[in-house]
Image: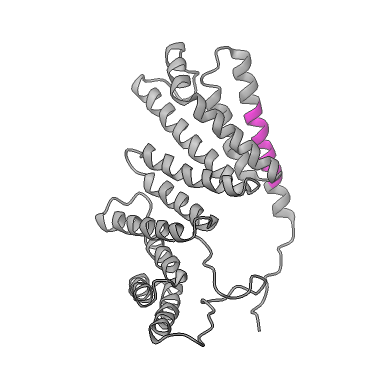
């Protein structure tokens, strides 16, 4: 799952820190207690001790409500404990608590793109299950759309909208085929084709446009190409002549080959050396 990088008070050009860096001078006793709880929770979160980390982040938030990192880390800890599609009440509660904390951060910092993406990702995960929640998928999409309003040249939110639109289109297509006992390999019959177009035509075109935009911003975006291929196949299900269908299937196949080429070239590139620890 995508989770935000929590901002520290370190300068923007400094190396990432293992835990928040803060200046402790001129702090009240409550603020110092909040920082101590935040530091303890950060170590626990890093070691997978989610429950202990959550307790410390809650304490940090209580000691100093203005400490934004405490809220971000608390939301991240809740989200880290969420398991996609697990039906348990405790799991659902973890997801809801994470959403509430991230939304709280967004009310304080409404231009925080990382938190928008975290909410979009979490809502997408929470939509999984039987049946799939189309309402949560649309909520997920709204966060990525808000990201694009603030930064339209960022490729990932365009990609994520495409993935959501494919998920909606694929689910509707599968349900239609199952209900009317149509094979996945065959074109939809005219009556179902019209119904599918009415239900998903705009969604599919939005997804195609979003994925094309992601690729225009990042030309070797192979994940976006893979989902664009899948959406071309879904669009082929509602065109009304075989020639157009064949064209769309051909475009989908071409993208699959392009993805293979990109992955092959990437595999041939020497591994980039990892940066050592910052002294």
Relative placement, left or right, of 251 versus 116 is right
Q: Main secondary structure of the magenta part?
A: helix
Q: Nearer the viewer, residue 165 or 8?
A: 8
Q: Position of residue 237 (x, y in %)?
A: 51, 21
Q: Residue at x 65, y 39 (%)?
A: 213
Q: Position of residue 171 (x, y in %)?
A: 42, 32
Q: Nearer the viewer, residue 218 or 236?
A: 218
Q: Is residue 257 magenta?
A: yes
User: Taking the image as drawn, is residue 60 in sight?
Assistant: yes
From this viewpoint, which residue is outermost toward the left?
89
The magenta stretch is 251-262
Using the image, determine if residue 258 lies above or below residue 105: above
Residue 227 occupies quadrant: top right
Q: Quadrant of the C terminus?
A: bottom right
Q: Position of residue 65 (x, y in %)?
A: 39, 71
Q: Is residue 119 magenta?
A: no
Using the image, determine if residue 168 lies above or below residue 105: above
Q: Nearer the viewer, residue 51 or 181?
A: 51
Q: Residue at x 54, y 38 (%)?
A: 162
Q: Position of residue 20 (x, y in %)?
A: 51, 76
Q: Nearer the viewer, residue 236 or 92?
A: 92
């Amino acid at each position: 799952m995508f989770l935000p990088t929590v901002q520290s008070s370190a300068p923007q050009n400094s190396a990432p820190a293992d835990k928040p860096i803060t200046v402790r001078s001129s702090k009240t006793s409550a603020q110092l207690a909040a920082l101590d709880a935040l530091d303890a929770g950060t170590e626990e979160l890093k070691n997978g001790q989610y429950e202990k980390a959550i307790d410390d982040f809650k304490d940090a938030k209580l000691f100093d409500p203005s400490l934004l990192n405490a809220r971000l880390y608390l939301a991240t800890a809740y989200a880290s404990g969420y398991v996609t599609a697990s039906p348990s009440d405790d799991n659902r509660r973890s997801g809801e608590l994470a959403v509430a904390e991230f939304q709280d951060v967004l009310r304080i910092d409404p231009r925080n793109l990382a938190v928008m993406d975290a909410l979009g990702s979490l809502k997408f995960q929470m939509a999984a299950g039987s049946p799939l929640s189309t309402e949560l998928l649309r909520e997920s999409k709204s966060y990525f759309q808000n990201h694009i309003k603030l930064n339209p040249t960022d490729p990932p939110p365009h990609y994520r909208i495409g993935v959501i639109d494919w998920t909606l289109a694929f689910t509707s297509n599968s349900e239609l085929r199952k209900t009317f006992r149509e094979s996945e390999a065959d074109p939809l019959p005219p009556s179902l084709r019209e119904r599918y177009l009415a239900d998903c035509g705009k969604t599919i075109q939005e997804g195609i446009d979003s994925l094309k935009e992601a690729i225009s911003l990042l030309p070797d975006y192979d994940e976006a190409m893979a989902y664009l291929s899948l959406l071309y196949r879904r669009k082929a299900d509602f065109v009304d002549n075989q020639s157009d269908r064949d064209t769309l299937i051909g475009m989908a196949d071409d993208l699959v080959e392009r993805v293979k080429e990109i992955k092959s070239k990437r595999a041939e590139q020497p591994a980039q050396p990892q940066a050592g620890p910052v002294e």
